[in-house]
Image: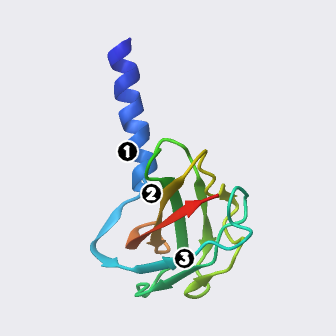
Amino acid sequence: MKSFIVATSIVVGLSVLTGCAGAPVSKNLVKMDVDFNWTSRSGCSAVSPPINLSNVPAGTQQIKVHMIDKQYPMFNHGGGEVTYAGNTLPEGALKSYYGPCPPNGSHDYEMTVNALDANGVVVGRGKAVRAFSK
């Protein structure tokens, strides 16, 4: 039973870390640039920060975002999926998001962004890490 729990934890952890587990990935995956900065509303709340993207591949239909705390990656900070409508996701665009709120000190948070085409294939991916302390 103990080995089952460990194996399940590993699978769940890898799914969280990849941000788009199970989605097929294009063999021509494009490396996107991701930039974000915390706003006064994005800490310890459900208001996602604005996210700027560049090098988004042609044919992108959806943007899927997932955030993890690098010091505690098993805590699910969520993210969300939005229809691609340009290279900036405005503040609050992600609906399944819970912002950074470290219990003490500063933690590093990694935002993984996947661009999906009309068939749900990941055609672009990028990441950015920012520290947050309350």
For marks 2 and 3 on the same chain, the one whose residue lies earlier in the sequence:
2
In the picture of the structure, the residue carrying the numbered disc 1 is: 14
Q: Amino acid at mark 3?
A: Phe
Secondary element under disc 3, as helix, strand or loop, is strand
Quarter of the image where one finds residue 40: bottom right
Q: Taking 92 as reference, is 11 left or right?
A: left
Q: CA distance from mark 2 to mark 3?
A: 20 Å
Task: Say which mark, if any, is on residue 20.
Answer: 2
Instruction: Give the quadrant of the C terminus.
Output: bottom right
The correct choice, above or below, for 4 with respect to 124 in the image is above
Residue type beneath disc 1 = Leu
Q: Nearer the viewer, residue 54 or 120?
A: 54
Front disc: 2 or 3: 3
Q: Earlier in the sequence, mark 1 or mark 2?
A: 1
Foreground pick, 37 / 53? 37
Task: Determine which residue is flagged by label 3.
Answer: 36
Which label's residue is closer to the chain start, 3 or 1? 1
Crowding at label 3, few (<14), some or many (≥20) Cα neighbours within 10 Å?
Answer: some
Indicate the amino acid at tag 2: Cys
Q: How many marks?
A: 3
Residue 124 percent location from the top left of the image:
38, 75
The numbered dot on residue 105 is: none
- Judging depth in this view, the residue of 104 and 96 nearest the camera is 104
